[in-house]
Image (cartoon, rainbow, N blue to C red):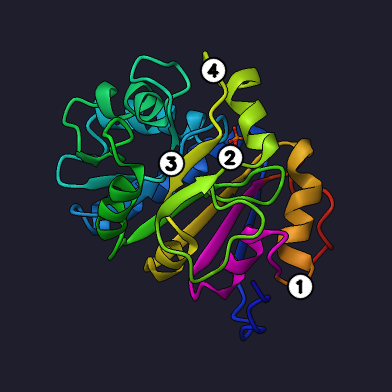
Amino acid sequence: MTAPGPAPARGYGLEVLPVGGWAATVASRLCHRLMERPGLRVCLPTGDTPTPVYAELVARERRGEVSLAHATVVQLDEWAGLPPGDPARCDARLRRELIDRLAAPPVFVSIDADGPDDEAAALAHDSAARGLDLAVLGLGMNGHVGFNEPGSHPDDPTRLVRLAVSSREAATSRYGADSTPTAGITVGLARLLEAEECWLLVTGERKAQVLRRVLEQPEGLDCPASYLRRHPWLTVFADEPAASLLRKG
Ligand code: PGA
């Protein structure tokens, strides 16, 4: 596949936050969006990055400061081939950390990775991922967002993908999967770029190099997250260690 042509630079917002205040700030922004638009359709990731944001959100919901009762949460990605009880399953983690802890949960549109046909599940989820108000994303060490691994194209729809070796390893070594998945289903870059608003969440010094690649070098197939700079309303929420290699100012 040839590399897509250059896109007009549109600019993005970058918020560099202290480690101690990062999750509270991101959760506050999410609360504001929910208050402005109670029926928010938001695509949410799993992984270690958003976990403290979800804890903040749950605490605020329990205090009656925000409600997700009218919102719709669309799952960003899922491993293919992990059984429902596997601790690494993205749907289980999202339920465990957010959905099931809310007094009044949102509609949760999960990816059906348990059926006989993953391609069909991906196609169905592609429809669900259209018309998002907000796409919230983590950043992989290899520049992936969701399971849009290196080589992914900005026109890619939601689809079944082969996982990069680093993602396979993360399943077992970081997220505790019982077996190593080799494929996944992910909302595609096309749907993410169509969302009205897009957030990229990045924490920790280990992400500093890849964040610099995402923001300060030309977009390219080697780094799918770099295509998010095409988004007309992208905000990057980075903690100070993650932002430590970015150009000042
Ligand atoms: P992490 O994963 O939030 O656990 O660092 C992000 C990703 O690989 O997409």
**What range is drawn magenta here?**
220-238
User: Closer to the camera, 19 or 224?
Assistant: 224
Give x and y (percent) for residue 96: 35, 21
At 67% from the left edge and 76% from the top edge, which residue is drawn?
Answer: 2
102 part of magenta stretch: no
At 59% from the left edge and 80% from the top edge, which residue is drawn?
Answer: 10
- Closer to the N terminus: mark 2 or mark 1? 2
User: Closer to the camera, 128 or 105?
Assistant: 128
- Closer to the N terminus: mark 3 or mark 1? 3
Label 4: element kind = loop
Residue at the spot of label 2? 22
Q: Is residue 81 left or right of residue 172?
A: left
Q: CA distance from mark 2 to mark 1?
A: 27 Å
Q: Is residue 222 above or below residue 161?
A: below
The mark lying in front, picked from 4 and 3, is: 4
Q: Amino acid at mark 1?
A: Pro
The mark lying in front, picked from 3 and 1, is: 1
Q: CA distance from mark 3 to mark 1?
A: 30 Å
Q: Amino acid at mark 2?
A: Trp
Residue at the spot of label 3? 27
Q: Residues within 10 Å of mark 3 (few under 14, many from 20)?
A: many
Residue 99: name its quadrant. top left
Q: Residues within 10 Å of mark 2 (few under 14, many from 20)?
A: many
Label 3: element kind = helix
User: Closer to the camera, 120 or 29?
Assistant: 120
Q: CA distance from mark 4 to mark 2?
A: 33 Å
Give x and y (percent) for residue 18: 67, 40
- Closer to the N terminus: mark 3 or mark 2? 2
Would you say the residues marked 3 and 2 are in contact, meaning their CB atoms lie under 8 Å apart?
no
Q: CA distance from mark 4 to mark 3?
A: 33 Å
Residue at the spot of label 1? 218
